[in-house]
Amino acid sequence: MQLVIGNKAYSTWSLRPWLVLKRCGAAFDEIVVPLNQPDTAARIAEHSPSGLVPALKVDGEVVWDSMAIAVWAAERYPEARLWPTDAHARWLARSAACEMHGGFTALRTVCSTGPQHWMIGPDRATAPVDAGLEKDVRRLVTLWRELRARFGAAGPYLFGEWSVPDAFFTPAACRFRHFQIDLAAHGDADGAAQAYADVLLAQPDFLQWEAEALADAGRA
Ligand SMILES: N[C@@H](CCC(=O)N[C@@H](CS)C(=O)NCC(=O)O)C(=O)O
């Protein structure tokens, strides 16, 4: 089984299924395609029908798109409990992960970096907080606070134990940290959303990704 990903310093989409597969204890090799290079598109096209990474090569098929890989993994590794076991929690976990997967365009465009910079590691920057970014940050803060308050009793993650939404929200936590977004200024009155973001950024698999990203980028 091979996971085709972009280089770890840049590819937040690749981070998500990588975290999911790690959580499953899956044995997989990485095929890393450096992004922002003249031959990037051609190299991705060797593996992925969509022309995008991530893609998972398994059992003679290619499963592409980060969410499709997470869904595949939940089927293949049911013992990993990638979605919450409680039905109501599971419905909302899927809604939250899909909302992140398909939305938050302002967050992803305003809080974005050029090819010489990345959101992993100690670098910090600022972003202009326009109306679109304000709306996205406030929505994420609200969502995280509500789900943590309702389902978070069993652990520090969004639904208590780690589940797929945590993979999909880890890049948002990276953006908040890198661009120094003060969640308290966007509705996080008692710091519950910030505490959740901190948990995502301290998760051991994420720390491994971050260390490898910095090493790849010559910053270790
Ligand atoms: N919806 C896709 C988005 C994937 C995506 O946009 N990947 C970017 C890299 S992070 C990509 O492959 N870009 C092509 C390129 O850089 O040439 C997913 O969830 O997997």
Image (cartoon, rainbow, N blue to C red):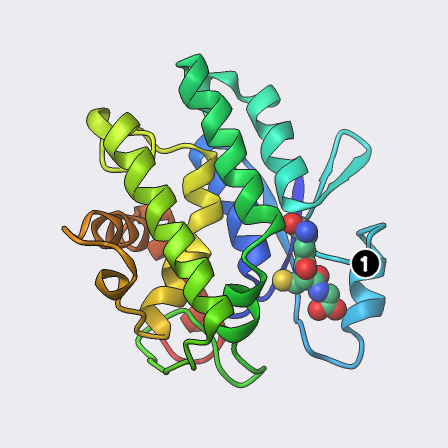
Task: Report the residue at 58% width, 62% height from top.
Answer: 105
> Disc 1 beta carbon < 8 A from ligand 1?
yes
Q: Amino acid at mark 1?
A: Gly
In the shown orientation, is residue 60 left or right of residue 144? Answer: right
Count of labels in the image: 1
Q: What is the quadrant of the N terminus in the image? A: top right
The residue positioned 34% from the left and 43% from the top of the image is 144
> x%, y% of residue 70?
58, 35
Label 1, secondary structure: give it. Answer: loop
Depth check: give the residue in front, 9 or 71. Answer: 71
In this rendering, the answer to whether 32 lies above or below 72 is below
Q: In this view of the protein, which residue sits in the foreground, 85 or 204?
A: 85
Quarter of the C terminus within the rendering: bottom left
Q: Give left or right: position of 168 versus 207.
A: right
Residue at the left extreme of this rendering: 190
Q: Quadrant of residue 69?
A: top right
From the top left corner, tell me how far across and down residue 192 is, in percent.
20, 47
Ligand 1 in which quarter: bottom right
Q: Residue furthest front?
A: 131
